[in-house]
Image (spheres, rainbow, N blue to C red):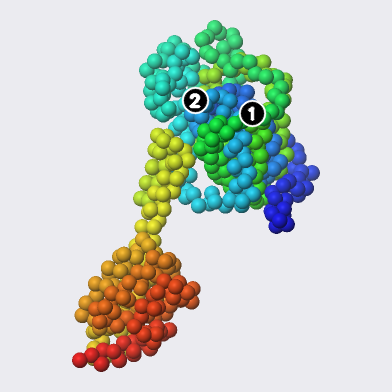
Amino acid sequence: MIRALHAVRALLPSRADYREVPKSWRRDLLAGVTVGIVALPLALGFGISSGAGAAAGLITAIVAGVIAAVFGGSNVQVSGPTGAMVVVLAPIVASNGMGAVAIVSLMAGVIVVIAGIARLGRAVSFIPWPVIEGFTLGIAVIIFLQQVPALTGPATHGGSHTNVVLAAFDALASADLGYLLWALGAVVIVAGCMLLLPRLHPAIPGSLVGVILVTLLTLVVSDPLAVIGALPASLPVPSLPALDIGTLSSLLLPALTVAALAAIESLLSARVAASLADTGPYDPDRELFGQGLASIGSGLFGGMPATGAIARTAVNVRAGARTRLAAIVHALVLLLVVVAVAGPVGAIPLAALSGVLMVTAIRMVHLATARSILRSTRADAVAYIVTAIVTVSVDLIVAVVIGMIVAAIFALRGLARATGVQREPILGDPEPGDERIAIIRLDGPLFFAAADRVLAEVTSLDDVSVVVLRMSQLELVDATGAHVLGEIVQQLERRGVTVLIKGVREGHVELFRTVGVLGSLRHQNHLFVDLPAAIEHARSHVVREP
């Protein structure tokens, strides 16, 4: 009980989290304002793309942003709605309605909190880099294609398709050409601002400038573009959504998917943040705990599940953030927007936000990274491509699982090939009968993937009377590998071939005894520590042959 309390206490905020604030508060304030400006169009856009609405996106960025900043495991992580979460939430909203978002957020938050308490934060390190990049590529494609229906007119839609590729084609087929031209014009203006203005000065928020410019133009020129609409001028009162067993059971699988995604993306973002600047280490378990609480808080206010946002976190670090104060300020900036300028924000055209998300999606794909992976090894290239395709065509979590399976299969195949079976000559002056002695050296790992090949190679020996199995170079041995060694001994002994074992490692002795390898030997004296003694004993057997 005491250990459990200490474990939970380690996940809670401490005074040390703000030790550097007296030195860095000016940089943190500037970074927080910068990230808040960058996050505004993204929060609005992701909220709309998910189907939960622009208000839900803002609520998530504010509430989850503060909670994750205070309770999370990174000093500079910025949390809120993200593109990956939008991809998961959109079909949940389509199937269960907007009311399901808050419930899923609460359920997923509880799951992630439990994962943090259970110390599962290091699990993300088992995901291979090509799988992560393939996952990111797939998400980028989905985010980009999700914007197509928003550009083709309010009367068009993606049909009944749940797949974004088919929905995008369907929306284009039924597009209102006049509306599409206006929307593409808005996208071009926003994209131009995002791409060109930062070249003039890195501090210029190109996305916000582009959105403001498009909004002003639509107020001056008569146009058909749909706008965000009315936004609340304050945060709603927190409340617990209506829950019942039927609803919870039907949303359990979506909640598990959301929780897995929130954990993966948040931990990856925190790890990236730790590598961008010397802002202190991150605690993966505390990060899960904090992100889980953030999603719970967001759900109580009617928001969406939250994750760490890699793009906003990177902006935060590059803007000079050193402590959690920056992420807190970012959320307060967004709260100020809700309180002070909710009316003007509601006049922003949806096409302008689509432009922001399209450019964001393109920036998620790094061509140099893709080339590196595709040129590395066939296993990594296949894992990268398969993960990306499954992400777009099936599901994000399924894609990660399948990508890891593909990577694991190739890794096991490579390990199996590393298992060596070599026949060695007898060193020194030859003696009569030495040709009847086979010294077999087993190298590398001996596990289930290589076991059958080793069995076939060793038992195929003929014209020998004694086989000496050298095992000092064996590294990893699992139960299947040990079982196969026992089968090798038994098969050779049944053929009248004496088997001697040399050099069993200390860590393998108990396994060999348990599985029966040592018991398969004809005599206990057939187990040796050094090779010369084994060869001498083998020669004594050959000499006694008729």
In this rendering, does residue 28 appear at all? no
Task: Report which quarter residue 537 is drawn in.
Answer: bottom left
Up the image or down, 290 lies above or below 538; here it is: above
Q: CA distance from mark 2 to mark 1?
A: 18 Å
Q: State which quarter of the image contains the C terminus.
A: bottom left
Residue 296 location in percent, x, y? 65, 36
- Residue at 72%, 53% (x, y): give it: 5
Q: Residue furthest front?
A: 245
> Mark 2 or mark 1, which has the lower sequence index?
2
Q: Which residue is mark 1?
A: 241
Q: Position of residue 374 (x, y in %)?
A: 39, 46
**Residue 503 image position (x, y, % from top left):** 42, 80
427 is higher (above) or lower (below) than 362: below
* Residue drawn 43% across the image and 74% down it: 512
| Label 2 CA crowd tier, 10 Å (few <14, some 14–19, many 20+) | some
Q: Amino acid at mark 2?
A: Ala
Discs 2, 1 touching: Cβ within 8 Å: no
Q: Could you tell me the amino acid type at mark 1?
A: Pro
Q: Which residue is mark 2?
A: 94
Q: How many marks?
A: 2
* Above or below 26: residue 120: below
